[in-house]
Image: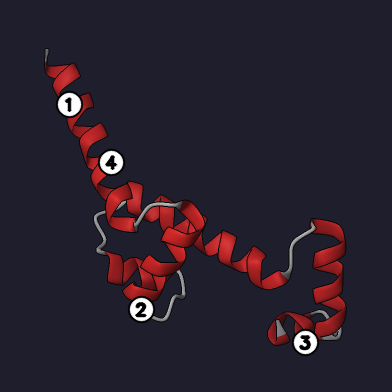
Amino acid sequence: MKALAQEFFLYPAYISHAFKKHLNINFTEYLKTVRIKEATLLLKNSELDIAKIAQRTCFDSATTLTRTFKSTVGFTPLAIMIIELSRNYEMTLFLIV
């Protein structure tokens, strides 16, 4: 928030208030949502492990990503990876037959 405020020559409190007013979500929640969406894309479309995905999406650790992901999405990152692998496997079988 501080870096964003400096970039646009605004006070952090002003940016925080504007986020809440216009997006109906605070800046921290918005940032968490963006990071979770990016993590979801990486889980579905890459072969990176959860620790690397946590790094790429600016979470402190794989544990923090897992805890935040589960509380936000309702599933663990590993569950998403398994679901995606099974979908890909089913699609492969469908194409073979």
Q: Amino acid at mark 2?
A: Ser
Q: Earlier in the sequence, mark 2 or mark 4?
A: 2
Q: How crowded is the residue under tag 1: few (<14 C-alpha within 10 Å), some, or many (20+)? A: few
Identify the secondary structure beneath mark 3. Answer: helix
- Who's the residue at 80% across and 66% down the image? 19
Residue bearing the label numbered 3 = 6
- Who's the residue at 23% across and 25% down the image? 91
Q: Amino acid at mark 1?
A: Thr
Residue bearing the label numbered 4 = 83
Where residue 28 appears, as percent x and y from the top left, is 65, 72
Q: Earlier in the sequence, mark 4 or mark 3?
A: 3
Task: Say which of marks 4 and 3 sits in front.
Answer: 4
Task: Say which of marks 1 and 4 sits in front.
Answer: 4
Q: Amino acid at mark 4?
A: Ile
Between marks 3 and 2, how big is the CA–CA gap? 27 Å
Q: Earlier in the sequence, mark 3 or mark 1?
A: 3
Residue bearing the label numbered 1 = 92
Identify the secondary structure beneath mark 1. Answer: helix
Between marks 4 and 3, how big is the CA–CA gap? 42 Å
